[in-house]
Amino acid sequence: MFPFFSRSKMSDAPEVNPAPAKTHEPHPLDALTGGAFSAATSGERASRIRDWLATQPDHEQLQEVFKELSGRDKGAARAVRERLDEIRRAKGQEVIAAEWAEKAQVLLAAPKLNIADALAWQRDAAKAGAPLSREPLSVLKVQVADRVKVIEDLQHRVQVQREAAVLLAQRIEVLSTKSWRDAQAALELLRADVARWQEQAQELTGDASWASVEARFPPLLDASRTQLLVVWEAFQPALAQAVAAAEDVNAPLPPVPVWADELRTARGQPTEAAAAAAAAKPARVAKPKVAPEVIEKAAQSVREALAVLEKETAEGHGKASAGAAAALRAVLKVHGKHIDSTLEQQVHTALVAAGELEGWQRWSADQVREDLVAKAEALLNRPEGQALGGRKMQETLRNLREQWKQADQGGAPNHSLWKKFDEACNAAHKVVEAWLDKIRTEAAEHKAQRLALIEEVKAWAQEHANSGDWKAINRALHQFGDRWREGGHVGEKLFAELQPLWKQAISMAAAPLEAAQKESLARRHAMIDEAMALGAAPTLRIDAVKALQQRWQAEAQTVPLDRKHEQKLWDAFRKPIDEAFNRKSADRERAVTELSARDRVVLEASKALEAANASGDAQQIRAAMQALEAALRGQAQAAEAVATAQKDAQAHSEAQAGALPVATEGGAGESAETPDGGEVAEVATPAPAAPKPAARPVVAVRGDDRPGMKKDAPAAPGRGARPGDRRDGRPGDRDGARGPRGDGRMGDRADRGGRFGERPAFEDRGPRLGDTAFRAQREAMEHAQLALKKLAAQAHGEALTQLLTAWEKRDAALVPGTQDLGSGVTASVRSAWTQALTAAPKGDAAEALLRLEMAAEAPTPAEHIAARRMLQLQLLTRRNDPAPAQTWGQDVARVLASSSDAGSARRLQNVLKTLLRK
């Protein structure tokens, strides 16, 4: 009837659906990167990425691969990131290269190229990171260097032409000292040399780069040309005149003295020098006889000069000895013919010695000069990165030249060394000249900027003359001042010219603000006077003070003043108000600091508690805490006693008046009336101690106000099965089963003490403690609680140490008491521990230690983690066995029964730290 299945649904064999094998789909970028995303290891992935990068992929592919790969393998993605950074740097260098290439082209296209600008271009380009070794900057760098080399070559040729002009002039002058026939023979060669010099000078001035030569070289070439032409133009007519005079006896003699004397000799006439000597030679007269006094005076003068020279020579004073030798020679010129031969011999000996000293001084001076030459040549040969700047180079050259002058004063001059020194200084001075040109250019730019700023300030002053925004005006004036100070360096003379113009412009712009500040100062001084009046008043008016302060703030926000001046005014305004508030606060603090009797008691109890905290005795600390709590409750008890006494007095007076017997509310006394209506006898009882407040009843327990849930109240009858029965069961109104409701709206809830049940009345704590007493008792309580915690921790640690020592020594007498071990250790548990220590060591404590670590939730050493996991699995199968947290006392006994070792002791100590505190 029914089809039978081959396998029943209730078969014990579980039906297993084999999960389909998880197939890894290839990543879309695997084809691009050569299978880098499907690589099994990170090293293989990095290798495939490097192979892919060798194919030089484009930037978009690199970004896409890096985005996908950075989340999977950062190590393999590092190579892609480096390639992206390299491309980014290359693009940045291309931009920089384009920028500096444009600057180089501007320099090369300019008709005048400054060498300093060309060198600065290369230096600044290198600092900016421009690729100078790659095109186009490499080609431009070579072009700029060639252009600079051409300019420097022109400058060098100018100096060569200058020297050549000097040499030609010297040749012409030398020929003027020889025979006119020699000059006539060298005339054609000189004419050719002078013409060649002029052609070379013309080539220099006609060069395309002549405009880029430094400004000091063209005047040098012009001066050399002028000097050479003047000498040459004077030499040619003189030589022609000499040739004509040689041919014609009556022709005039040339203006050259040597040639004129030669021609006179050829004509048989005396020379000009011989004629002058013959005319000047006087007639021979007899030599007069010299007086002895003159001879003695001459010898005395020579001896004095000789003594000075010998003294300076002996002391080695080269410069002084040279002066003394010169003085001696001067004396000899006057008195030398009147001295004898002995004294003359002494004079010559002293002069020879002084000459030797002067020669040594000359040698030492040459050593100093050679040192100065080396220093001057080293100025341009400094290591890279240590080149001197313009100002430093100028100061160094000035110092070197001053030292050379001092060396010249100490010895004879040395022209060869001077030439080397001067050439080195001139070569180094190029740096100074470039720096000076830069300074002049910057000074011109700064001057233009400052003049433009002055005009801008004048225009701004006219535009904002009627503005009322004083803060904006003040801010703008400060900005103008900052721009003037940051306007760059100008010379002192130029600054002296610009400063009056700036002061005039800024004064005109600041005039409206200064007028407003003057009016604001008057108003602020008036408010200061008002503040002084308010502060001096016997009663401080807070509303008036607030209004005055608001007026001050509004004034300060409207018209700004100088920061220091405004602060001084604010201090003067605030001072009287602060003094008034300080007086008020002092009065309040004086009233607060006056200690009451209760405050003194609390302070004394707090001090006693602090002393107990310092002693470190827990019993003393607890006793001092109880004393402080009693002091805090003392005033409330006193107030209650006073109220009870007042009630007793009132009851006694009523009893005397014949009123009904009344028992005092506080129970302080009882009164009774005799049967015959006679005298009332009163028995006064002492005032009872303050009753301990009753414990607050629990009123929010679930189901406590439902019928039948209270244990002491019978359950209300249940509802009937039919509506009629329910009506019979609830006569009257629908709340009949509950009984009559109270008169109030809340019914019997008012009998339960309000919303929260029967709550006891608040204890009358008396007047509030003073601030000093309150802080003292609070700090003392906090310190006491901390001290008790510390002592408890110390006691816990000592008990644990004693227990471990007892285990190590197998001495049950060393086991701490039950009170020392804490509430978690009962007497039976401690007895089990002592019995375990009394017996000989036996058993293995490995499982017990693992159970203890599980109970304390403490970590297990690494070598026992596998055992702990195995134990946890075993405990899962033991459903009825108690948990380790319930049997840790027995586990400790098993551990103590085993032998002690350092590792087990450490593990036991770690778990007992936690378990003994539970």
Image (cartoon, rainbow, N blue to C red):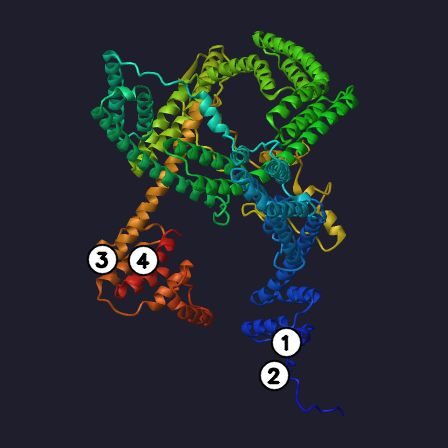
User: What residue sits right under mark 4 in the picture?
Assistant: 829
Front: mark 3 or 1: 1
Q: Is residue 211 left or right of residue 253?
A: right
Image spot of residue 743 (x, y percent): 67, 31
How far apart marks 3 and 1 lie (CA) works out to: 73 Å
Which residue is depicted at the point 24% across and 56% down? 805
> Could you tell me if the residues under marks 1 and 2 are in contact, i.e. CB atoms within 8 Å?
no
Which residue is depicted at the point 22% across and 25% down? 341
- Residue type (three-letter) at the residue carrying disc 2: Pro
User: What residue sits right under mark 1 in the picture?
Assistant: 35
Image spot of residue 876 (x, y percent): 47, 70
* Count of marks overlaid on the render: 4
Near-viewer residue (527 or 126): 126
User: What residue sits right under mark 3 in the picture?
Assistant: 812
- Residue type (three-letter) at the residue carrying disc 3: Ala
Specify which label sits upstream in the sequence, 4 or 1. 1
Where is 692 relative to 284, above or below?
A: below
How far apart marks 1 and 2 lie (CA) works out to: 42 Å
Specify which label sits upstream in the sequence, 1 or 2. 2
- Residue type (three-letter) at the residue carrying disc 4: Val
> Could you tell me if the residues under marks 4 and 1 are in contact, i.e. CB atoms within 8 Å?
no
Front: mark 1 or 2: 1
Which corner quadrant of the image does residue 503 belong to? Answer: top right
Q: Secondary structure at mark 2?
A: loop
Which corner quadrant of the image does residue 50 belong to? Answer: bottom right
Which corner quadrant of the image does residue 48 belong to? Answer: bottom right
How far apart marks 4 and 1 lie (CA) works out to: 68 Å
Specify which label sits upstream in the sequence, 2 or 3. 2
Q: Secondary structure at mark 3?
A: helix
- Residue type (three-letter) at the residue carrying disc 1: Gly
